[in-house]
Image (cartoon, grey):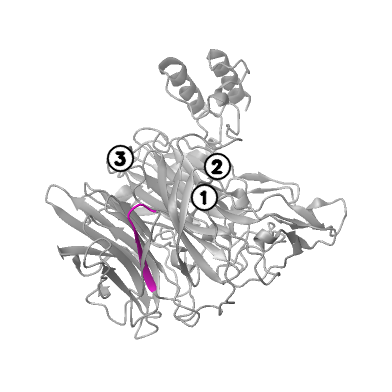
Amino acid sequence: MKKIKYQFILLMAVAIASQSVNISQPERADRVKILEPTSGPSLSATGAPGRIIRYTNRNATQFTLVDSSVNGYGMISSSTRPLSVSSSGWVLGYRQWAGESGTAGQIGAAFSSNGLNWTTYTNLNPGFGTGRYPSALGTPEYPYVFWNEYTGPQGNSLYGGKPYYAYDEFGWDGGSWSSPQIIDALWNSNKDHWILSPDYSYDAVNDELNFNVVSNDWSRDNIWLFHSEAYFDGTIIFGSETMIIDETNDLISGDASSSYTSNGIIDVNNYGVGYVAVSAYFLNGDTGGSSFANHHTLIFKKTEDYGVTWSGGQGGSNYYYIPDETFEDMIANGNFDLLWEWVCLEDGHVLATQPFASYGFDIRVDTDGDPHFLVGLIASDSDGVWTSHTANSIYHFTIDKDYLVNPGAPQTSTGWNYSKVMDMSEMFKWDNQGGESYWKIVFPSLAISEENDDVMYAVISGPDPGESVTLEENGTPDDVCDDFLGYPQWNEEIFVVKSEDGGQTWWCPYNATNTIPDCFYDENDDLICTEEWMCPDGETLNRPDEITAHAGTGATDTRVNIIFQAQDWCSQKIRIYAGWVELDECCEEPCACEMLGDVNSDGAINVLDIVALVNYIVYGTPLLFEVCGDLNGDNVNNILDIIIIINLIIEG
């Protein structure tokens, strides 16, 4: 074995091998607009080929290397849709490696009939070369790629964002992609469209294809929508832009560099029901002065005619939203515990005031037209968000669409229902190598099975620090709180969490990549790794960091399709992988409830657990983990266990 040192060579580099965490101060909660060079790779490549990870058949996964990119910005936003899978095939849209001296903004596409063998198509944007944030859609006849070009300052446009699409004119795997087609025929130098979120839906009654594209304007703010008005032989004619979310007048508006409003995301089902959503503050909502909602929450509009018209109207507003009452219910029953106690804090604890909906979220619509959200919630107060707070988690929210205007009580058939998907207190507390917090980078991606609406998947990529090693004892030797720690097995991984009951409960997270480096620290605190993880230079650790995972369409009851990126530290490229994860049973051990009595796995013991256990005993309704209900250890779930749960609730 040889000594390895870290070299940060990519724009998407992540946390260092040894790192202390600043958890004594809250962090600003605004979203910073991500910029990058208009052309050219971030650094020239070393020429040394990097190791290609083979993910085949590991733990029910199948991932194939598709192509390479120069950096990882292409899939960093949760609102893009880079992977589309249907009976016609697989299509990817991505930023494509264009050689050591080539542009960083070349748009590529890839086709596969089975997700295993890939054909790549190069340079979909010839003459431009400044493509950003690509997505992909697939109709029965044609594959599409959508993106925006970064054309630079002009007029009142700070970045010159122009929206485009291209399609294979000869159909699937036809090999003849069209020239870039502009989406906004009335584009001018006052506009600045960025980070497109496209959607396609089919109206079987009228035999019509409907396309909708949502964009963020980085100069005018607000969220804009383009709806298709005509379609023939693959060509889409979009109507003029429509302001779908009025950030300037209805929400807390941002500036040229940052905002409290996320990127917009759209999803419309094949019955014409869909939503455009952001996470944001209503005007004066940050100070408790909104008459609608005073949390940083999910705010959205609905269509019931494939995107032709859009409505709001909850509480007298122009929108629908998750109301304060829902978050207050989570706090009251302990599902989102505002108190964080830890000996290393100056006064022993932090008492936050409310959850803050993160900027990275996803929305999908089931066949009934009901919305399903995945979003990170972070404990916050007037000073900002607490990234290390133990309450921080990914949550699922849903509601029957018929009650959007006037929601009933939370956790009822007429109100907003929520469930904890994955604890994020360990991931969110870290910063990447560029100083950006992971709570702004890590995002969930949602897929709903096309066979059964009750089956859904949360796909999340983020840091897995592994076990820590004390590198240096600072201050008081007996005080572990000021030690400098190292994480020799640090890596970013792809986690998949599954639900089989429409998001009421979730399985434990499944690590689908599990590529932990074989490293340790020696007596001199030098990082030692086996040759498997070394680059040819003998110095650089080729940590495989799987990042920016997105769930694609085409999920089934046992499979979710995924695209992600993996950093190659040797060649200074980003590898693009696509494939699937199969989950037909709960993950490997340990796979059990985190708390005896919490039979619905929502992180709290309450009356909902009693109801679930009664339904199991009387009607045979399945429990996620039967062992959670066996509180007296007699290997049977019965009335004796219910009595113990009642006592636990009464005793607090």
- Mark earlier in primary sequence (2, 3): 2
Residue extent of the magenta highlight: 107-115
**Residue sitting at x 29%, y 72%:** 164
Find numbered disc 3 in the image and state the secondary structure of the residue it sits on.
helix
Q: Are marks 2 and 1 in contact (CB under 8 Å)?
A: yes
Residue 428 tag number: none
Nearer the observer, 300 or 105 = 105
Residue highlighted by disc 1: 377
Q: Quadrant location of residue 146?
A: bottom left
Horizontal placement of 474 versus 376: left or right?
right
**Image quarter for residue 290?**
bottom left
Give coordinates of residue 490: x percent, y percent.
66, 56
Vertical position of residue 71 compared to residue 88: above or below: below
Neighbour tally class for label 1: few under 14, some 14-19, many 20 plus, Cα within 10 Å? many
The magenta stretch spans residue 110: yes
Q: CA distance from mark 1 to mark 3?
A: 23 Å
Residue farthest to the right, as pictured: 477
Residue at the extreme left: 206
* Amino acid residing under circle 2: Phe
Query: Could you say where residue 583 lies in the image, as x and y percent from the top left?
Result: 46, 39
Q: Label 2, on which residue?
A: 336
Q: According to the image, label 3 marks what residue?
A: 403
Q: Is residue 90 above or below residue 600?
A: below
